[in-house]
Amino acid sequence: MTETKERNLYEKISKEDVFKKLEGIFGSKNVTNKSVDLYPYSYDMTECEPHMPDFVVIPENKAQLIELVKFCNQNSIPIVPYISGNNVGGLTIPEQGGILVDFGKKMNKILHINENMMFAILEPGVTFGDLKKHLDANYPHLRYSYPFAPPYAGVVGNVILSGMNNLSCKLGSMGDSINGLEVITADGQLTRIGSCFYGIDEADNDSWWSRYPMPDLMGLFINWQGMTGLVTKCAVQLWPNPPLKKTYLGIVFGLPDVAPVMREVGRTEIVDDISAVTIEVVKMTAELPEPKKIPGEPDFVVLFSISGKTESLFRAKEEYLKMTVENLKKQGIKILLVDADEFTKLFNLRVRCHLDLPAVILSLVEYSGLTWFGSYAPTHKLEDLIPKVNDLFLKYNVPPFIYMKMMKHSHYGIFRPILRYNKFKDEEKIHNLLNDIAELCFAEGCIPYKTPIWMTEKMRELINPGWLRLFEKIKKCLDPNKIFNPGRWNT
Amino acid sequence: MISIQKGEDLLSITLSTILNYRKDESEFQNLVLNWNKKILIEIEDFYSVEVIFNRNEIRFKVSDIDKKVDLKVKMNIYTFLDLAYGRLGPVKAVFQRKIRIKGLLKFGTLLKFIKIFLKSMQMVASDPNNNYYELNKETK
């Protein structure tokens, strides 16, 4: 059984009284303090140390949450937001106990779709599966973008933690596609950020159309891992759903050569998404849990997704993609470009989980443990990073699992070595490997996202002191009683 | 009952998928049962895989192109896909030297190779179902 880290949370009010108060706010059916109910919230797939929450509550509306925040702020009791627990960073493990707010059960409504300005207003518990189903059924001319994550993962968690999806080569970080937020701050104040800021009471549903040009307060809540407030609504951008779509598969021989391939294709500005995985990952998906690369096999497979509204536009993009690949070949890079639909059918249909998103990515769910060094990366460092990290995997006798993306037409990249493992068996080895990978990637300037606490501790040694002081000041100002997801970023 | 080894490299996995598609079909079983031949398939830019037909077993082995076998077939990945998706016929492919065959005079072996491999590739390619779990219902 996992235990709660001591912070003596219940000095001002007893646990019994807290429970009574929570029952009063949420109703007795939506509050629990039973160990059997709390346990599943105490851990995730990662190596992060488990901790039990003291209570789990299931909210239905923001009025309940405002009351909760005021109560917690008064009594210095931690609040940890939770959607589906699928993050790979221990982000919803209640580091210091307290009250875990499970948004996934009841606050999971798609509140509004604006077809004209193409955005959706979502409650925090809406999943990728919910949104895709809703759009496909009611707004087939609109699309959202989806990560390599299961359909039951949350949309709002992904955007406010700057996840990346299958339109990221075009759009960049999903944090950039937020139009507006509704947040409860520590004093229980409900705040609307973005163009929805007009209006004394409720905002008009159609007013959530832009993040700018007022001072950008959104940054006080994006990437803060729930440390500054409780998000209760989020408006995300949608995009036109073009009728013509196709994914090409770039089969690349030569570990570092995948970097220029991704960069150059990203710069063409015609590709929706570029995702690359090591060949071992392709084989893992085809039911080989511990694959070894054999001589002659390619090193990477890269997915290039293109789309077009008309046949001629689509063909032009295809032509440009092929031309770019031919130019890369002339530079001595060995790459083969094939139709992904055609290839996957003959190879193994299981790999379609990378194409038909949102989907459970089979290679990520085979083991009880999963962790990664998920980072934003300077793309000019990839040639160095890839072989070095690959060697680290081999040194630890772990099949190399490297996943990369090009973001916003190659302005920056994503570099994510992923580690699957048997919990309680390989934990030490995997943590050592992850630690080595982290050290190497920090040295090359990579910046991890959805960071676990042990990683931010290392980062603090590298970060400019001015940044850290400002960060602490903002945290203190927004959360003076340390109630919002305390412990994250070593706060 | 035909037993087909699970591939462990890209080409063997592909060949295994293709051959598995028909393994319960009687015509396919009659073709491969006791064929007892070794076929070497090389995909240019990749490597060569030896497909070993032995009684009711089909096995794969990454092999050297110089290995002595019953039939050697060499093509690139684009020809492989064109053949599967019906954009190119086998005869035309041979005449255009898009497929290179060593052992061409062993006509029976060649014919059987076409019946086993090419037909299976085309059947997999033309199946409209893209859902692995629909096609492999025994998979959890």
Image (cartoon, grey):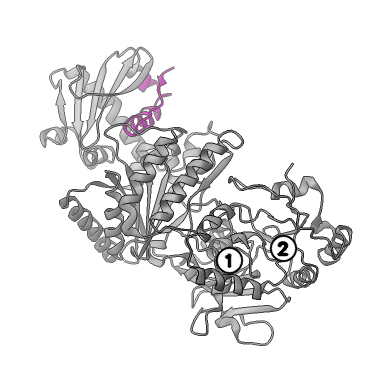
Which quadrant holds the C terminus of chain A?
bottom right
Identify whether A46 is placed above or below A192: above
Find out whether residue A202 is within the magenta segment.
no
Would you say A293 lies left or right of A235 here?
left
Q: Amino acid at mark 1?
A: Trp
Q: Amino acid at mark 2?
A: Ile
- Viewer-proximal residue among A463 and A48: A463
Which quadrant holds the N terminus of chain A?
top right
Mark 1 Cα-neighbour bin, 10 Å: few <14, some 14–19, many ≥20:
some
Q: Give percent across and percent down for residue B28.
A: 35, 22
- Viewer-proximal residue among B13 and A314: B13
Identify whether A333 is placed above or below A286: below
Q: Give percent across and percent down for residue A312.
A: 26, 65
- Label 1 – label 2 distance at C-alpha: 14 Å
- Mark 2 or mark 1, which is nearer the start of the sequence? 2
Q: Give percent across and percent down for residue A437.
A: 44, 47
Magenta region: B1-29
Residue A79, numbered circle: 2
Residue A103 in sight from this viewpoint: no
Q: Residue at x 64, y 58 (%)?
A: A83
Looking at the rendered structure, whether the residues under marks 1 and 2 are on a common chain is answered as yes
**The residue marked by circle 1 belongs to what chain?**
A
Residue A224, numbered circle: 1
Q: Residue at x 63, y 74 (%)?
A: A182
Would you say A467 lies left or right of A443 here?
right
SS under mark 2: strand
Identify whether A477 is placed above or below B93: below
Residue A62 in sight from this viewpoint: yes
Identify whether A118 is placed above or below A316: below
Q: Residue at x 47, y 70 (%)?
A: A176
SS under mark 1: loop
